[in-house]
Image (spheres, rainbow, N blue to C red):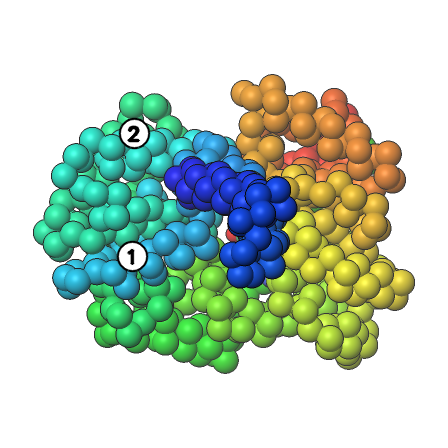
Amino acid sequence: MYKQKQRFFVLMILLLVLTVLLLGLSIAAGIIPSLKNIPFLEQGASILAMLSGGLAFAMVFKITSINESMRSLHVENRYYLSRESLFYNYQLFEKRIERLVKSHKKQGTYIVVFSASKRAVMRNVYRNNTVTQLNGFISDYLNALLAENKEYKSSDFAFCYYHGQFVIYTYLPLNETQEIISKINKEIYAIVERNDIKVFALPYFGVAEVRKDQSLFETLDNALTARDYAEKHFEPETFYSDDLRKDASLSEVEELREAIANNELEVYYQPKYNLETKRFVGSEALVRWNSPRYGLLAPARFLDRAEISGLIHEIDMFVFKRVCEDLASIRRKGDRMLPVSVNFSMYEFYSPDFFDNISMIIDKTGTARNLIEIEVTETTAQANPFMTTSILKKLKDSGFRILMDDFGLGFSNLGNLNRMAFDTVKIDKSFIDGLITDSKSREIVKFLIALCKTNNMEVIAEGVDKVEQVEILRKAKCDTIQGYYYSKPLPLAQYQAFLANNPFEKKEEGK
Ligand code: C2E
Ligand code: MG
Ligand code: MG
């Protein structure tokens, strides 16, 4: 990037010199009569002067846009790698590597993809400063590796960071590429130990050969498939072949499709406790896959493939329908009935039928709308703000309550809070995790609570599992708490039994 800037700078200077020369020549033609006899000098000189002026303008424009993309690269790198301007992002990497690949004579260019731990852990990059810190150290190491290996040219070796994974390009024989992999593998464990990083290091590497008949993105996709295969089969490193694809994608999606058809999905309920009334006031519905083959699976194990394949829509609708049916059965039995919040994926907020789909289920099951709260993550709300705002407004106007989930993650846009008129805001677990030990998290949580209160919104803290966290939140005037401290998510019958008889409400009543 800096080199590119330098090149532009040199070109700029050359152009300016050319412009000055040409202008000088055309002025000289006005003073020295003999120069006037040169045919078309004046016209030629002014055309060239205009041309170089235009080019200089284009250069300035180009430099401004390079500066702009550098600035956003700094922000991106700071966000994902806790470092400024270390790496290319994928777009810049792709441009550079495609140019390099075209110029290669020999066979043997590889794309290696890896992350320091399982995907589910690394996905927490949005939630977890520790992961970002670890990524920062890894990126330092990759740069050092390039710097110390005098025998590698910079066109032999390049990296970028892409959606939670490091991507390396090597124009080296396979055995040397594998040597690099094993060095990085060792170093990841060393980094975690040396810096006392609280992440369970378990690196998985996927390798794919760059083929001239494929785009770089296709090669990257192959390497990612190999990496996922490695994780699933507990292999530290997998080399891509087309056979892997059948195993990694088709069969997994088919498996999930069958699971939905065979009624293997279940809905669990996690209670929410109000600190003011000292009563449980509702629950969140969370999907589980009770697989005869793998046992009880949490969403992190299957939502990815559901999102990729579009099955997420069926899951969302299944959960919503089951919640409405469960509420109907609680009502019939005359048991204690509390509102339930339901998660919906981004997919629903791009679907024009979302409102009609859920209205149909509500009408069929005779569910009161004020018993349902719709959970939208901050990321969903930001991805498509105009569409989300209008759908949420329609839902709210028809009587549903609206909740913003995972608040505080990513680039929080406080303006969303007002514009989208949320009834409830759930502060993300990553801030709650730091409540006891990290004064910064404590201050942020206090600030977020105060902010929501000013906007007349209920505040929930999620992922609370320690009594000390409850006390801090109570002092900060948080309304409601959801977390393992009170209860894990439970199947319906156990949840109803918990509501009927639990140590928290009893303790308060007995006081
Ligand atoms: P979420 O909506 O933010 O749900 C909260 C997650 O935090 C749940 O994980 C819950 O079990 C977990 N949790 C709650 N209290 C604690 C605690 O004290 N400690 C710890 N370690 N964890 C706690 P779960 O059930 O695995 O769900 C993960 C995510 O999957 C959810 O995050 C939500 O984004 C998604 N999800 C779950 N059910 C559905 C669904 O029906 N539809 C859609 N679209 N997404 C769903
Ligand atoms: Mg949620
Ligand atoms: Mg959440």
Q: Amino acid at mark 2?
A: Ile
Q: Position of residue 320 (x, y in %)?
A: 67, 68
What is the crowding at mark 2: few (fewer than 14 residues within 10 Å), some, or many (at least 20)? some
Q: Is residue 365 above or below residue 19?
A: below
Can residue 135 be seen at all in this image of the molecule? Answer: no
- Kindly indicate the quadrant of the structure image that contains residue 464: top right
- Mark seen at residue 100: 1
Residue at point 54% right, 73% down? Answer: 310
Q: Which residue is mark 2?
A: 191
- Kindly indicate the quadrant of the structure image that contains residue 442: top right
Q: Earlier in the sequence, mark 2 or mark 1?
A: 1
Question: In the visual, does 63 lie left or right of 402?
Answer: left
Total marks in image: 2
Residue at point 43% right, 58% down? Answer: 301
Question: In the visual, does 233 lie left or right of 318?
Answer: left
Outermost residue toward the front in this view: 34
**Which mark is nearer the camera, 2 or 1?**
1
Q: Position of residue 372 (x, y in %)?
A: 77, 60
Q: Is residue 251 above or below residue 407?
A: below
Confirm or deny contact between disc 2 and disc 1 (CB under 8 A).
Answer: no
Q: Secondary structure at mark 2?
A: helix
Q: Nearer the viewer, residue 327 or 312?
A: 312
Residue at point 74% right, 22% down? Answer: 475
Q: Position of residue 444 (x, y in %)?
A: 67, 28
Give the CA separation, mark 2 to mark 1. 31 Å
Q: Position of residue 480 (x, y in %)?
A: 73, 38
Q: Nearer the viewer, residue 238 or 472?
A: 238
